Image (cartoon, rainbow, N blue to C red):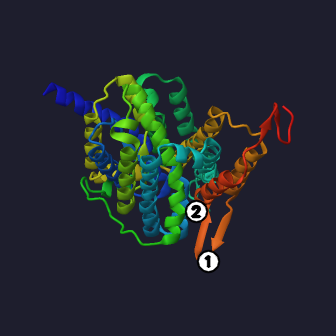
Amino acid sequence: MFSGIKQFISGAQILFVAFGALVLVPLLTGLNPAMALLGAGVGTLMFQLLTGRQVPIFLGSSFAFIGPIIFAMQTWGQAATQFGLFFAGFMYFVIASIIKWRGMALIERLLPPVVIGPVIMVIGLSVAVAASGMAMGQGGGKQLVEYGPSIFLAAVSLATTIVVAVFAGGMLRLVPILSGVIVGYIVAAFMGEVNFAGIAAAPWFAAPHFVHPEVNWAAALFMLPVAIAPTIEHIGAVMAVGKVTGKDYTVKPGLHRTLTGDGLGVCFAGLIGGPPITTYSEVTGALMITRNFNPVIMTWAAVLAVILAFFGKFNAILQSIPLPVMGGIMVLLFGTIASIGLKTLIDAKVDLMAPRNLVIVAVILTCGIGGLTLKLGALNLAGVGLVSILAIILNLVLPQDKQQDGIVEGQDV
């Protein structure tokens, strides 16, 4: 009895740690937060079913899809975007099949750090303008909140997030985003910038609103390459959790099973209108602090997420968070994503003085951040999807830099 209560509390704690990031993605992209909770909960349970509940992992909303979702919503609408997100899950199945067939060797050849690093940087920097606009109270090209209050609220939420991330200790340090949102929301309420009418009108319990996906192959092909970065992130996360728990999950249950489980969750989330899901480093950090490695706690976290999806008042509160508060969080968040890409290059010691590497990184960053679009009839490729394909092609086509007798071709060393 006591053990069951302890696991339930531990599961609630895991959901609390993941909560800020989990609901942030739908709030930034215009999707329904209730669907994010439902997708994360059911997706985690599907992952556990496929992996025999052996891996202590909770799957929450993926930041990698924020920019592509915003672009797709504006270009094709929500129904088509959902189909694209559903289709993105198949990239997990493809990579899982390759790993089962050839191991990691082929993946490392197709997606080395010189490809993955700048692609991740584009994921963060391609929507930097949107982050700054929200911080200034702007959305859809209009001034939705007065500039002065907007900048102040954005600064409050950003400063709180930074202070918690840098100076806080223990469990508090794991929830900097949630801390920034809470403090920003409270300040906004005192300033009269929160509309409580929607909260008052919302029912206590309500079934989440489902939007049926609409088949759109342009949106699907746009989203498919976006999933490359999260799949690589998944592999790293599984290895990281294994180091924490002292078990090699790449062997048992195997990376092909964990990737397939994650992919099923992505497909489900896309079908119901939630953002794609992925592994969370915050949860890994919580495992390191609590030392509770029982996968049952992830089951409880998933069940609680599903239950919260049906609380109407709760979701109304989430949707009442002012635009500038979210903008302040985005300023840090998207820069953080970009820095992860930079760290990928640094950790792998990618030599940017080598012409081949310089060309790949330069083309990816310029095309991705500059918003280059490739139009092929009715099909438009842009953003992360386009640069992912470009990066893979350049990596395969360009010859490796030759090195003989301490001389790299084209430069002295």
User: Which residue is most to the left?
Assistant: 1
Nearest to the observer: residue 146 or residue 304: 304
Quarter location, residue 285: top left
Quarter location, residue 163: top right
The residue positioned 75% from the left and 47% from the top of the image is: 356
The residue positioned 39% from the left and 39% from the top of the image is: 18
10 Å neighbourhood of mark 1: few (<14), some, or many (≥20)? few
Nearest to the observer: residue 260 or residue 383: 260
10 Å neighbourhood of mark 2: few (<14), some, or many (≥20)? few
Nearest to the observer: residue 111 or residue 59: 111
**Secondary structure beneath disc 1?**
loop
Q: Does the residue at mark 1 contact the one at mark 2 (Cβ under 8 Å)?
A: no
Query: Is 387 on the left-hand or right-hand side of 2?
Result: right
User: Which residue is most to the front?
Assistant: 405
Quadrant in which the C terminus is drawn: top right
Q: Which of marks 1 and 2 is in front?
A: 1
The x, y position of residue 45, in whole percent, is 28, 46
* Label ID, residue 140: 2
Is the residue 202 above or below the residue 161 in the image?
below
The x, y position of residue 58, in whole percent, is 36, 40
Say what amino acid the circle numbered 2 marks: Gly
**Secondary structure beneath disc 2?**
loop
- Does residue 409 show up? yes
Nearest to the observer: residue 48 or residue 154: 48
Say which residue label 1 marks.
377
- The earlier-in-sequence mark between 1 and 2 is 2
- Does residue 135 show up? no
Is the residue 78 above or below the residue 64 in the image?
below
